[in-house]
Image: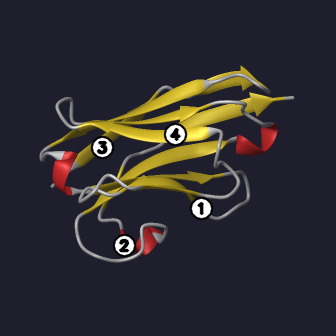
Amino acid sequence: QVQLVESGGGLVQAGDSLRLSCAASGRTVSMYTMGWFRQGPGKEREFVAANRWSDLTTYYAASVKGRFTISRDNAKNTVYLQMNSLKPEDTAIYYCAAYSAGGSYYATSNYNYWGQGTQVTVSS
């Protein structure tokens, strides 16, 4: 079992930055692909970014590429999402997730473990 706890969300203005953290416990995340997803008001949960455990390759949704950066610190068992140049459309609850089996990094159904989410609100 892996427990994930997100933190770092808040209310910011357009153009600002935030760094989300996802602290894991129970098992080391070094053997898990870690992902960030978000769910905006009235929308389905969508893929944001992922970091594959095997070679640390990173993947991003087109809407955040160039603005967001996913990283991990295996020693701290923590994954981060650095979000720059935030836009109002980035407003959502952001979730951290983990999976260890194969499959698509962007599919929510592949992820075994989820955090409870942290709210990010970007005002214009």
Characterize the local packing of mark 4: few (<14), some (14-19) or many (20 or more) Cα atoms within 10 angstroms: many
SS class of the residue under badge 4?
strand
Q: Decide: marks 4, 3 in contact (CB < 8 A)?
A: no
SS class of the residue under badge 1?
strand
Amino acid type, residue under disc 1 in the picture: Glu
**What is the x, y in percent for residue 108?**
46, 68
Nearest to N terminus: mark 4 or mark 3: 3
Q: CA distance from mark 2 to mark 1?
A: 13 Å
Residue 110 is labelled as 2
Amino acid type, residue under disc 2 in the picture: Asn
For this orientation, the residue located farthest to the right is 124
SS class of the residue under badge 3?
strand
Front-most of 65 and 16?
Answer: 65
The residue indicated by pointer 3 is 4
Nearest to N terminus: mark 1 or mark 4: 1
**What is the x, y in percent for residue 4?**
30, 43
**Image depth: mark 4 or mark 3 in front:** 4
The residue indicated by pointer 1 is 46
Q: Decide: marks 2, 1 in contact (CB < 8 A)?
A: no
Residue pictured at 59% horizontal, 61% vertical:
46
The residue indicated by pointer 4 is 69
**Image depth: mark 3 or mark 2 in front:** 2
Q: How is the image coloured?
A: secondary structure
